[in-house]
Amino acid sequence: MNNNSIIIATKKTNDTKHCFHFSFRKSIKWNNLGEIHINLWKLKDVQNKNEEMYSLDLGIKFFNFDNAIDSILLFVPYNINKNDIVDLGCKLQIKAMVDTLFNDTFELQTEDTKSRLRFFKSANSDIALYQIPSDNIKKIDFDSSGSLFQIKVDCKLPSSPKSRNLYVRMRLNIKGVDNKRKLRVQEELSNDFIQAVFSKSELYDIRVNDFRNVSEDVYEKIFFNLKYEPLKFQKAHMFFMTNIKDNVYNCDSSNMDVRMLEYDKWNSYISIDKKSSMLAYHWRTPRDNNPRNSYEVFFRVVSGNWNFGKFSYYALFVILLSAWGSLLIELLDFIDFSRKIILKLVILICLTVIFFVLWKLKAKKS
């Protein structure tokens, strides 16, 4: 079975106190409920303008964090190295960047530059932003398609914090042909002869904690061997940033909004080519208080793609068809009427058989 879902799980802190020769477990509150933010960036490759670069940003907000989470386990259906997953907390140290990311107005409540925690507060929310040290991110080797990472959460909020909502954010750089094929499925625009030459269609199916779309060995490794618990989502947001020339189609357009991307506000967060305008497409879960076990967004992107090989193939087909038609007309001028009827009948039968065979082959594929 192919792995097609991102899995986010957490493990409870093993907080034990010792007293002489005895030990007892301290009772701690474990709130395994959070909010996820997914940002998928489709950017032009600086070195190869004909290729796309993909970056997948994952943000997790833990509600009422009470120092009870030991670590986060992250499974992604892409084969990536440890160097391809980086912490983004270091890019969110200033108020302006936090305002842009959350589309809100925050106030920085701490000036401790040595701490890996930054406390921000707005009229609608408050967060304790955590910078993940590089040594806290470890890749776990196991025999399955995809990559498994353990992120140690060793920060401790003070007893009287300015926020109990811990926020972590990381980026996955998706490289290589195989990983891109797992991220999006390219299909031919067979319903439009001309459009297929100048455009391409891509299907994106982003899933989080959809256990039906992971193999048994991944499920067993996470929940039975490593003993993690899946994160539940109070809210979920998905953003897709792409060129303004791309056309994005969603199955449920009522759940999607779009806006222009402001380059000047994102310069310190990600490198964007200013020569082309970009749009940010946004999906969110319905406004209710029901926790969710999984989250999924499916959409299609039709973008410009000049295909010289396909254009040459179609042009050659038209030229050959025209040449055969001209040759057939000239041939019919040199034979008598009865032979013309027989020749036309043979050609009609051959074309009917060819059409029937092609129709059967297409029916089997569908």
Image (spheres, rainbow, N blue to C red):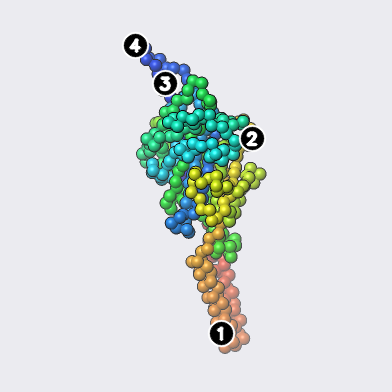
Return the mark for residue 15. 3
Q: Earlier in the sequence, mark 4 or mark 2?
A: 4
Instruction: Report the residue marked by disc 4.
Output: 20
Using the numbered discs, state the Cα–Cα distance from disc 3 to disc 2 in whole angstroms: 36 Å
Using the numbered discs, state the Cα–Cα distance from disc 4 to disc 2 in whole angstroms: 52 Å
Q: Earlier in the sequence, mark 1 or mark 4?
A: 4
Comparing 120 with 247, the one in front is 120
Return the mark for residue 287. 2
Question: At numbered mark 2, what does the secondary structure look like: helix, strand or loop?
Answer: loop
Residue at screen point 57% across, 88% down: 334
Question: At numbered mark 3, what does the secondary structure look like: helix, strand or loop?
Answer: loop
Q: Amino acid at mark 2?
A: Arg
Q: Earlier in the sequence, mark 4 or mark 3?
A: 3
Closer to viewer: mark 1 or mark 2? 2
Instruction: Report the residue marked by disc 1.
Output: 331
State the image coordinates of residue 150 (x, y, percent, origin top left).
Answer: 41, 34
